Image: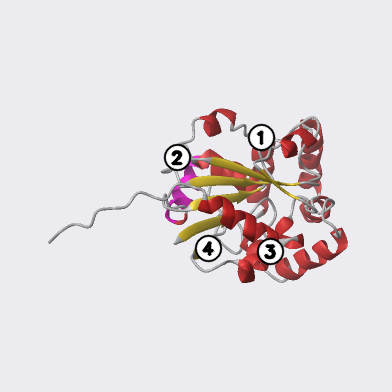
Amino acid sequence: MTRLVLLSGWGCDARIWQPLAEHWPDGVSVGTPDWPGYGGRAPLAAPDSLEALAEAMAGELPADAIWVGWSLGGLLAGALLARLPAPRALILLGMGARFCDPEGVSRAELTAFRRAFARDPEATLAHFQRWQLGGEPSPRDAHRRLRTLLDGGPPADPATLAAGLEWLETLDLASALAGAGCPVIRISGANDPLQAPAAISRADHRLEQAGHCPMLSRPAALAEALTALADRCPAPPHRLERLP
């Protein structure tokens, strides 16, 4: 049995993964926990504390699973490698060792985005959700699907969203990923508007005709790619049963 844990990105709770549900083959077990502050889950008292985040997520990020982190979810999963037992593998979807890149989303752009969020969180979140869909084959259809999935649910905690933007601007996992105690695999949509072209070309797997949100535009292809990559990861060590 292959066990996957799918971790959502900034501004989206675990419902973002629902389009993949019908595409998983037999033998794949999938968990989609929400981060604290998302999906009605209580936020952390200190939303910007990685130590508190690790403590809150420890029971949902087992070492015998493959963690799949999308966007900010990948950045946070990578940061938690130093604070939790390493998984079978870490798959980064639409994310590398850092978010900001002069050829992608620059630090100046993200700083301006954070200022806009501080002035009007709701409008800024709505703008971001449309922006990230720009590389999908039909951005309008992808946005309609996103709204169908997320509308009517509990909104994300504003302080958690603000902390997420700070992490996007400041976290750099180059050293952490280089010394990770597990394989680290990168998947990128070939037309991802939030990643630099060089970062997309360096990905271990590229999804053609997809952008930053392939779970909305190409769920079958994404599920197939994740399953194939998971099959190549080392199996978890067998635990010996204790004899009576």
- Is 141 situated left or right of 212 in this image? right
Quadrant where the C terminus sits is bottom left
Amino acid type at mark 1: Arg
Q: How far is the residue under mark 1 from the one under mark 2?
A: 18 Å
Q: Give the residue furthest to the left.
A: 244
Query: Considering only order in the chain, which callout, 1 or 4, is on the residue closer to the N terminus?
Result: 4
- Residue 52 image offset from top left, x and y in percent: 48, 45
Q: Tell me the magenta residue range.
A: 50-59
Q: Please name whichever residue, 189 or 82, is drawn nearer the observer in this view of the structure.
A: 189
- Residue 159 image offset from top left, x and y in percent: 64, 49
* Residue hosting label 4: 30
> Was residue 141 drawn as part of the magenta stretch in this picture?
no
Mark 2 nearby-residue class (10 Å; few <14, some 14–19, many ≥20): some
Mark 4 nearby-residue class (10 Å; few <14, some 14–19, many ≥20): some
* Residue hosting label 3: 220
In this rendering, which labeled residue sits more in front, label 3 or label 4? 3
Amino acid type at mark 3: Ala
Query: Which residue is pictured at 53% across the width and 30% down the height?
Result: 178
* Residue hosting label 1: 98
- Is 34 situated left or right of 217 in this image? left
| Element under disc 4 | strand
| Element under disc 2 | loop
User: Which numbered disc covers residue 83?
Assistant: 2
Amino acid type at mark 4: Val
- Is 6 situated left or right of 86 in this image? right
Residue 7 in sight in this render? no
> Do residues under tags 4 and 2 come within 8 Å of each other at their CB atoms?
no
Q: Main secondary structure of the magenta part?
A: helix
Q: How far is the residue under mark 4 from the one under mark 1?
A: 26 Å
In this rendering, which labeled residue sits more in front, label 1 or label 2? 1
> Do residues under tags 3 and 2 come within 8 Å of each other at their CB atoms?
no
Q: How far is the residue under mark 1 from the one under mark 3?
A: 27 Å
